[in-house]
Amino acid sequence: MKFLLLDDQRGARTVLKRLLEDRPDIDVVEASSADEARLRVETQDIDAMLLDIRLSDAPNDRGGLDFLRWARSTGRTMPAVMVTGVSELAEIREAMRQGAQDYVLKDELCAEMILPIVDGIRERFALKGEVQRLREQVDRRQGLPALVGASPAMERVRKLARRVADADAPILVRGATGSGKEMVARAIHYSGKRANEPLLAVNCSALPGTLIESLVFGHQRGAFTGADRRVRGQLELAGAGTLLLDEIAEMPIELQAKLLRVIEDRKFRPLGAEEEVTLDARIIAATHVDLERRIENGTFREDLYFRLNVVTIDVPPLRERDDDIPHLVQTFASEQARALRFTDAAIIWLRTHHWPGNVRELKNAIERLALLSESDDIDVAILEELVGNDSAVVERELTRLAKTLLTLTTKEPSKLDAIQRALVEQALAVAKGNKSAAARLLGVHRKMLERMVKADATGDESDEDA
């Protein structure tokens, strides 16, 4: 860091400079007058100042204090330490009012007095640098720079995200599974005025309706059986930040009405509470399904859709932005513990590969390469072995199983129903009864799994013509 040393006496500057430069990370810039000090500040990056209050032998000289006033009037906030005489207590108080961090008496210019003050400034300077580094890191990983890609489609997403970052209105983020909807929500949050506030997320498809209501709205003690204490919901915990309602289409219809009222009134009432709580958070909803179709079949409220649809951001699937794949590969590779290098042919292979899981699948593939590849140089052969053949093996195995099943006889009138029932039962067994985990194994949503289980229990045929 760079210290400005302002003192009219060369001998005093020599002593102070020697003391300051005892620390290896300090560079000293000298000035013998206020005018010279102004020039140093205006032309160099000064991090801290050590100022003599008097810059001449004149009894009324207060040049160092006047310089501090000038520095503060120009918006410069670097730490300042004043060098003063015992009789200058009024000037010391004024310097403190101007933002000086400390002072040292001229009769006590020694290492024991100066260096602890300097070390305190150094520690605060290092902490400030660390905070700035962490903020830049968060911005790269969570803010707009995290939306990797130079394609027109991603540029539209970034532009819209930037425009709504400070908005209070609800935002609807739509896109295929794995396309990066949550990343867009995070970019909006960390690029706006709420960046220092909480960002909370609720997956509406992961929990039953009763638990979602308690999780989102909170509850009072005694609101229901087992409610032995007051629990603040995510709407309250989000404070002035952002609440992301992921998979909003899976929210139970009765909770949709309650959410609509919250958005319109900016107030909500926790379960069992008498008083309402003011909503300060901004709501972002995300979905991969066709909400218009859900409205048609009566499983999603049209009025809630219009309230959420104030601003809609459509996240493109990876097949519509294959030009971004090289940038995404470079970004994901840089996050790995080892340095992966991709040949031009490998990049072409990655660009033409089918990615049904979109960006998430591509990221997982890069992580797999970092773990399993024996070479840091990734070519087409390695990709086909560790990435491409996975899907090929699955396709071959499914084909083999299908042929085998077709040759079997079953008491069931429909082999498709029998296969579905067996898959559901096995998925629930593997997931130990956890329906959300079983749904992930099957590649369907929890609601779909519940309908399949219900159909099996009632014997309802999925095909009315069968």
Image (cartoon, rainbow, N blue to C red):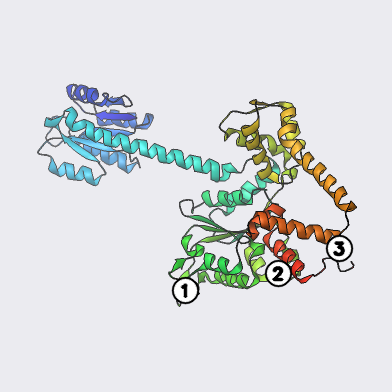
- Residue 386: percent from the left, percent from the top? 71, 34
Amino acid under label 1?
Answer: Glu
**Residue 74, above or below 375:** below
Of badges 3 and 2, the one in the foreground is 3
At 41% from the left edge and 38% from the top edge, which residue is drawn?
130
The disc placed on residue 299 is 2
- Residue 422: percent from the left, percent from the top? 76, 58
* Of 328 and 19, the residue lying toward us: 328
Residue density around tag 2, few if under 14, some if 14–19, many if 20 or more, within 10 Å: some
Q: Secondary structure at mark 1?
A: loop
Q: Which residue is mark 3?
A: 411
Q: Which residue is mark 1?
A: 276
At 53% from the left edge and 72% from the top edge, which residue is drawn?
265
Residue density around tag 3, few if under 14, some if 14–19, many if 20 or more, within 10 Å: few
Residue 235 shown left or right of residue 104 in the figure: right
- Residue 111: percent from the left, percent from the top? 19, 28
* Of 444 and 284, the residue lying toward us: 444
* Of 247 and 183, the residue lying toward us: 247
Residue 421 shown left or right of residue 184 in the figure: right
Amino acid under label 3?
Answer: Lys
* Of 140 and 69, the residue lying toward us: 140
Residue 276 in sight from this viewpoint: yes
| Disc 3 to disc 2, C-alpha distance | 35 Å
At 55% from the left edge and 32% from the top edge, which residue is drawn?
337
| Disc 1 to disc 3, C-alpha distance | 58 Å
Amino acid under label 2?
Answer: Thr
Of badges 1 and 3, the one in the foreground is 3
Residue density around tag 1, few if under 14, some if 14–19, many if 20 or more, within 10 Å: few
Q: Secondary structure at mark 2?
A: loop
The disc placed on residue 136 is none
